[in-house]
Amino acid sequence: MLQIDQPFHGAVVNHRWGTQDESGLTLTVTGQSPAYGNVTVNGVPAKVSLGHFSCPVAITEAEQDIVAVYEGSYGRQEHTVRVVWDRHSRPRYRFSIDDNSYWLRDVAKQGYSSLFDCFYLDLLRKLHREYGAKFTLNIYYETEDGFQLPQFPDRYRGEFEDNADWMVLAFHAAANLPDRPYQHASTDKLVGDMDMVQEEIVRFAGEASLAAPTVIHWGMVLPEALPALYERGVRVLSGFFTPRSYGYDVNYWLDRTRSEAIYTHEAMKDFDTDIIFSRVDIVCNGTPPEEVAPTLQPLYDNPLQAEIMDLFTHEQYFWPFYVRYLPDHAERLDTTLRWVTERGYEPVFFHEGFMGGPMP
């Protein structure tokens, strides 16, 4: 059977995949083919050997079909994949922090004169000043002790807006528990919670501080909810797409083929919903400082994974009262940000442009 293996359907390709100039991106298309016949790819004759083919193909459009055709002893066969060309790509990273709620409760309770009197926000500001880092804080509506966003005052709104170029807020979930709240939830439940959180963000932090979500709590929503998320501005969703004994997980219910493709690459576009799915490259609360480089270096060395770094952690590990508090959590972030900065990666927000870069 004729099949294109690389690039895969929905692949987000960039200059690292081949050779790029003003005329386009030339990459090598590879796959499997029946014996005893000829294969062309977009009309170009391919090299065929022992059931495999390869062929250079020019990508010249923002989204382009790659069509392989076999003709021979097994008749005529055709296989098509579509790729997205990140034409103006540059090395970049985004930093997303999940499960934000404690700092909101702290600021509201303490009544600080400035947001940055809260040690957590002050730490993020220091990292911004040191590395230019930008942070997306994915927040809950309420904490486990009953604090809710309507209790957060709006007197810090100006300060939020003044810092919205590097710190934005996005919906994550209604609350930390139950786990996997949207894995089987209705679309109405998901968007209802999202609208509830976003309304509060606009109230106390202003429109400039509101970002479209790029991580839903536990990275699982039903496929039928994705169009509604797109309608509300979601363009990128990050997850782990991790292979487990029972299948792939934290993958927004994508099938095994697509989950494997994302896990072994960087990103994939789902053309049915127009949402791009991105693989998280590091979870800082699970990565001690000495393991940061060994975690990121293999990705940096792989041209299919090196262009965009999707960085990630969770808020609760900063707080001493948390049962799994990490005294070196700040050091983990500093080490990670220093590593990407020294290698020329620029900070971006995934909700802006094309995964933080110019539109193709």
Image (spheres, rainbow, N blue to C red):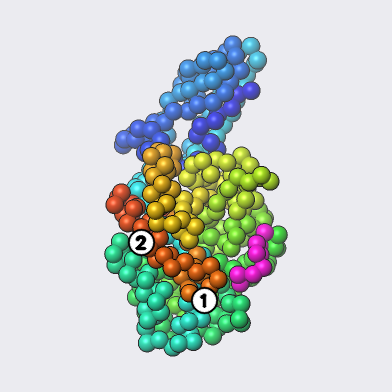
Q: Quadrant of the N terminus?
A: top right
Question: Along the line of sight, which residue is nearer the eye, 80 or 130?
Answer: 130
Q: Main secondary structure of the magenta part?
A: loop
Residue located at (60% from left, 60% from top)? 218
Number of the front mark, 1 or 2: 1
In the image, what residue type sits under mark 2? Asp
Residue 5: give x, y in percent of width and height: 54, 30
Q: Earlier in the sequence, mark 1 or mark 2?
A: 1
Categorize mark 1 by other alpha carbons within 10 Å: few (<14), some (14-19), many (20+): few
Residue 90: give x, y in percent of width and height: 34, 47
Instruction: Using the image, tell me which numbered label, if any, was put on residue 334.
Output: 2
Residue 86: in sight, yes or no? no
Q: How far is mark 1 from mark 2, CA to CA?
A: 22 Å
Left or right: residue 30 compared with residue 347: right
Residue located at (60% from left, 45% from top)? 243
Q: Is residue 225 magenta?
A: no
Residue 67: give x, y in percent of width and height: 53, 29
Residue 41: give x, y in percent of width and height: 50, 24
Residue located at (56% from left, 58% from top)? 230
Up the image or down, 32 lies above or below 316; here it is above
Question: Along the line of sight, which residue is nearer the eye, 167 or 269?
Answer: 167
Residue 54: in sight, yes or no? yes
Residue located at (55% from left, 40% from top)? 261
Categorize mark 2 by other alpha carbons within 10 Å: few (<14), some (14-19), many (20+): some
**Secondary structure state at the residue bearing disc 2:** helix
Asked whether the beta carbons under mark 1 and mark 2 sit within 8 Å of each other, the answer is no
In the image, what residue type sits under mark 1? Phe
Residue tagged 1: 321
Left or right: residue 26 compared with residue 218: left
Question: What are the residue bounds of the magenta stretch?
Answer: 175-183
**Secondary structure state at the residue bearing disc 1:** loop
